[in-house]
Image: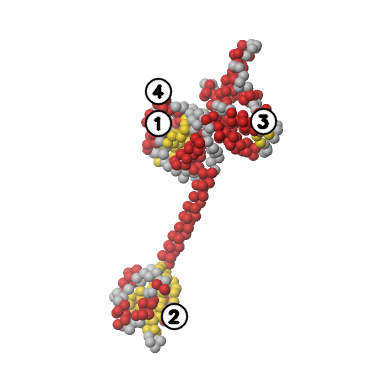
Amino acid sequence: MAIPSFSAFHDEGINLEGLLEILSPENNLVLADDMMVSDGNGIILRVSETYEKNFGFAHDSIVGRSAFDLEADGTFTPCITAEVIRQRKKISATQTINHTHKNVMTVGIPLFDANGDLKYAVCFNTVSMEQINSIQRNYRRMQDSLQHYSQEIAELRTRATSTNLLFKSAPMQRLWTLMQNTANTRANILITGETGVGKSAIAKAIHKMSNRADGPFIEVNCAVLHENLIESELFGYEKGAFTGASSSGKIGKIELANHGTLFLDEIGELPAHIQSKLLQLIQEKTIERLSGTQKIELDFRLIVATNRNLEEAVQRGLFRSDLFYRLNVIRIHIPPLRQRKEDIVPMAHQFLARFCGEYNKSLTCSPRFLAFLEQYDWPGNVRQLENLMERMVITAQDPILDIAALPLEYTAETSAPAELLPGGTLAERMDAYEAQIIRESYQRCGTTVAVAKDLGISQATAARKVAKYVTARS
């Protein structure tokens, strides 16, 4: 039988004002529909339908029985109705309904007649302990999420200032704004610029500023990968894929970039068949390892870079047009250092501080030295400036860097071409001319790998000639 209306309670002699007071907001009860009413002796008179439904009681198993018997047979532990009658006061406690193993917060309130005799005991189940625990868990999760988001905001602010990039010139300020606007997108990015302008540094900065900063940053220089091995290096392979393959297989660079950023430098050097596979990868975001049969789904941000004119390569049939358009979603062009002179001195100071820390030295730059840096054309761009500052720190004999300590190739650039130098044998003149070519190439390129590519010679030859004409004379 369902619990009657308030008017029915009043008809049976229940103090309506007292019952309304029980239900008032001041009691701060989070009321469910579970309610039980007993008389002053503990005999259960009414139980709500929801009480019976929620706790699996048959109507006759409770109504008409004594609360003390229900306590004795273990139906309730403790029985709040029995406690209210014993103590003749309001009781709030956890009550266990044993056959369902449910723990509920129960409030029991005594109702007295005009003579002060206990007339009724009314018990409400407010919320179950499971609900309370769930609320507490949800609250803790919200607190954890709040802390996580606060940390994330702090990390994003830190990332914007931890990229180790110094931009003072207007072109680079505009580039920085573009980086900020695109860092958290999924769009492919094509970075262009001369050798040594800092394409890799820009790619790393975009990664650090993005929501993938906690993921891997995998950099691949396509120009130095052997054509016969480039596919296995990028896509990986299963065991036994080819002669000499690892017996356990290998994860490729692309797969290593999952949940992070894949940076393909010198993208213009990819052979045609790898261009086709890269296009398929961009479209499907899945790969198959060599000799593999399973498609592997990947989630990564793709950034590519080149010092070549890809539009011209497309026209000449050296680069796929459909791949170019897929890559050229966001174009970031880095101006050469000679076109942003305002950045030279701040970057020189940054490199000086870094290398002084690495080599445990304390050095400064003379005004004359800084003026030379600003006037120099920097054919090798930022990489050349960085290399020069490291060399100056290593070889410094005085606490102040000055132009007198500059390497020979920086002070001899106005020399006449080797073939016009008077005297000397043909071999001597050819050696001098070769030295000039090697020095100029090294200034532009900054590494023996790039020199080899620039002059069409092997890296071993480039390394030997740089050691002979550049390093030995610095």
3D distance between C-alphas at marks 4 and 1: 13 Å
Q: Residue at x 50, y 42 (%)?
A: 208
User: Which amino acid, mark 3?
Assistant: Asp
Q: Earlier in the sequence, mark 1 or mark 2?
A: 2
Q: Residue at x 31, y 72 (%)?
A: 49
- Any mark on residue 206, and which? none
In terms of secondary structure, where does tag 1 sit?
Answer: helix
Report whether 124 appears left or right of 203.
left
Q: Earlier in the sequence, mark 3 or mark 2?
A: 2
3D distance between C-alphas at marks 1 and 2: 82 Å
| Residue count near mark 4 (Cα–Cα under 10 Å), binned few <14, some 14–19, many ≥20 | few
Residue 326, quarter of picture: top left
Which is more toward the observer, 221 or 235? 221
Which is more toward the observer, 405 or 361? 405
User: For the residues carrying marks 2 and 4, which lies nearer the camera in this image?
Assistant: 4
Q: Residue at x 51, y 47 (%)?
A: 157
In terms of secondary structure, where does tag 3 sit?
Answer: loop
Q: Earlier in the sequence, mark 2 or mark 4?
A: 2
Q: Which residue is mark 4?
A: 316
Q: Quadrant of the N terminus?
A: bottom left
Q: Which residue is mark 2?
A: 89
Image coordinates of residue 314 in percent, x first then y, are 40, 26
